[in-house]
Image (cartoon, rainbow, N blue to C red):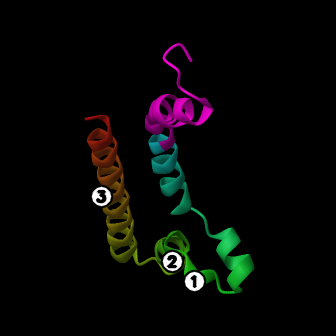
Amino acid sequence: MLDGAGFWSKIRYITVPQLIPSMMMAVVLRTMGAFKVYDVLTVFTGDATTSVSYLTFNNAFRYFFLGKASAMAWMTAIVILILAIIYIRLLNKKED
């Protein structure tokens, strides 16, 4: 306000850049949470096999394919890690 910035200029150049790190962390946490959801997918699609976490659980504890379930869990963890790295790199690029 002291330099003559209007409402939208303050929002664009001051408020949003200060909120980006918090928003990026929220996106990372929500992405990780999205991989754990299977009840919502089951209700909306009518098919419980639409979720990776549900398939991993079934392979491990219903059919006792522990090797396959372990591989699925590792691949899910690697995908989440890659997405988190991409988010963090985008965050660091915006700070420069």
Q: Rate crowding at label 3 as few (under 14), some (14 to 19) or many (20 or more) other CA atoms within 10 Å.
A: few
- Identify the residue position indicated by label 3 in the image: 82
Q: Position of residue 75 (x, y in %)?
A: 32, 67
Query: What is the CA distance from the residue labelled 1 to the residue labelled 2?
Result: 6 Å
- As shown in the figure, which amino acid type bears the numbered disc 1? Thr
Does 14 appear in magenta? yes
What span is colored magenta in the figure?
A: 1-23
Q: Does 50 appear above or below 18?
A: below
- On the image, numbered disc 1 is attached to which residue? 49
The N terminus, quarter of image: top right
Element class at badge 2 = helix
Q: On the rendered structure, is 25 left or right of 8?
A: left
Dot 1 and dot 2 residues touching (CB under 8 Å): yes
Of callouts 1 and 2, the N-terminal one:
1
Mark sitting earlier along the chain (1/3): 1
Mark 1: which secondary structure? helix
Determine the residue positioned at 30% across, 54% down.
Answer: 86
Above or below — where is 52 with respect to 5? below
- Mark number for residue 5? none
